[in-house]
Image: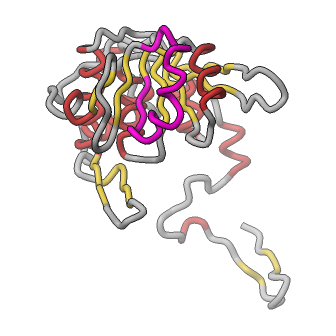
């Protein structure tokens, strides 16, 4: 590969990708572009066993948990006070399976909307991936939102489940609960969760259930995520994201 001249030293910097350790993922951009097809990109993913479709959570977690990466750390969380949790791919598979089973126990069905409102706790990732396994539609909410933006998005998205913390629920959701008649279940992550109709403690609801779960057949065009625009120039608009999009995510 042709060398380039460093602007400060005047020396020629020679790039030899074949000698780099670890090797680059994209050694020749032009060649990769010329050879690229979406069929090849799709072939790099496993798909659900038995040709049962394509599910984002299976590609992100389960296919790795079933192979040599099972005991490799998939998620590392370091809290503000120094607390630390590591989840391997096998751990993450089991935890997301538990959440999918918990949703089933609540009667939550495929296609129903699961909203998440919390900081980047491990349970945030577990909830998103577990809901995707259950073929629910996941919608993220930013913790900086006030009660009204939260209410509007949950109304537009017809929220059935909300996963949040006791503090965020008390500050931002409790007062607007009567505006959300479709919100059947609120799953609370953290200590001292309040009690009331439709309120569930994560530790009691999710932790004890079975870590065995089989993802049902998932059409690649099945809706996985519902994102809302910021709403700064008018009513927030929803954008859907299907399981098939994992092909683009993986290849890029």
> Which image quarter is the N terminus in?
bottom right
Above or below, comparing residue 80 to residue 224 in the picture: below
Q: Position of residue 220 (x, y in %)?
A: 50, 15
What residue sits 41% from the left and 15% below the top? 53
Task: Please identify the quarter of the rendering in which residue 152 is found.
Answer: top right
Q: Position of residue 177 (x, y in %)?
A: 49, 19
Residue 126 is inside the magenta segment? no
Front residue of 133 and 66? 133
Task: Please identify the quarter of the rendering in which residue 35 is found.
Answer: top right
Q: Position of residue 131 (x, y in %)?
A: 39, 24
Residue lying farthest bottom?
Answer: 9
What residue sits 51% from the left and 62% below the top? 23
Q: Which residues are magenta?
A: 162-183
Front residue of 79 and 30? 79
Above or below, comparing residue 80 to residue 129 in the picture: below
- Name the dominant secondary structure of the magenta segment: helix
Residue 165 is inside the magenta segment? yes
- Residue 144 seen by the camera: yes
Number of marks in picture: 0
> Which image quarter is the C terminus in?
top right
Left or right: where 124 falls relative to 241: left
What residue sits 62% from the left and 19% below the top? 240
What residue sits 55% from the left and 53% below the top? 25
- Residue 41 seen by the camera: no
Q: Position of residue 91 (x, y in %)?
A: 23, 43
Above or below, comparing residue 42 to residue 218 in the picture: below
């Amino acid at each position: 590969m042709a060398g380039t001249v460093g602007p400060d030293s005047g020396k020629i910097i020679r790039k030899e990708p074949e000698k780099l350790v670890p090797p680059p993922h994209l050694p020749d951009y032009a060649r990769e572009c010329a050879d690229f097809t979406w069929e090849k990109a799709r072939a790099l993913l496993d798909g659900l066993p038995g040709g049962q479709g394509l599910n984002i959570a299976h590609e992100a977690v389960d296919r790795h948990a079933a192979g040599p990466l099972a005991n490799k750390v998939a998620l590392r969380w370091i809290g503000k006070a120094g607390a630390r949790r590591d989840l391997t791919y096998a751990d993450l598979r089991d935890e997301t399976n538990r959440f999918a089973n918990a949703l089933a126990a609540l009667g939550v069905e495929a296609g129903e909307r699961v909203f998440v409102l919390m900081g980047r706790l491990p349970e945030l990732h577990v909830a998103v991936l577990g809901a995707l396994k259950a073929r629910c539609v996941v919608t993220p909410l930013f913790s900086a939102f006030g009660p009204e933006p939260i209410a509007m998005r949950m109304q537009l998205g017809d929220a059935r489940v909300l996963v949040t913390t006791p503090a965020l629920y008390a500050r931002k959701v409790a007062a607007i609960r009567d505006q959300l008649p479709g919100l059947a279940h609120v799953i609370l992550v953290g200590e001292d969760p309040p009690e009331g109709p439709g309120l569930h403690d994560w530790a009691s609801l999710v932790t004890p259930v079975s870590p065995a779960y089989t993802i049902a057949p998932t059409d690649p065009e099945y809706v996985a995520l519902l994102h809302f625009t910021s709403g700064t120039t008018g009513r927030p608009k929803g954008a859907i994201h299907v399981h098939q999009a994992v092909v683009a995510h993986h290849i890029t």
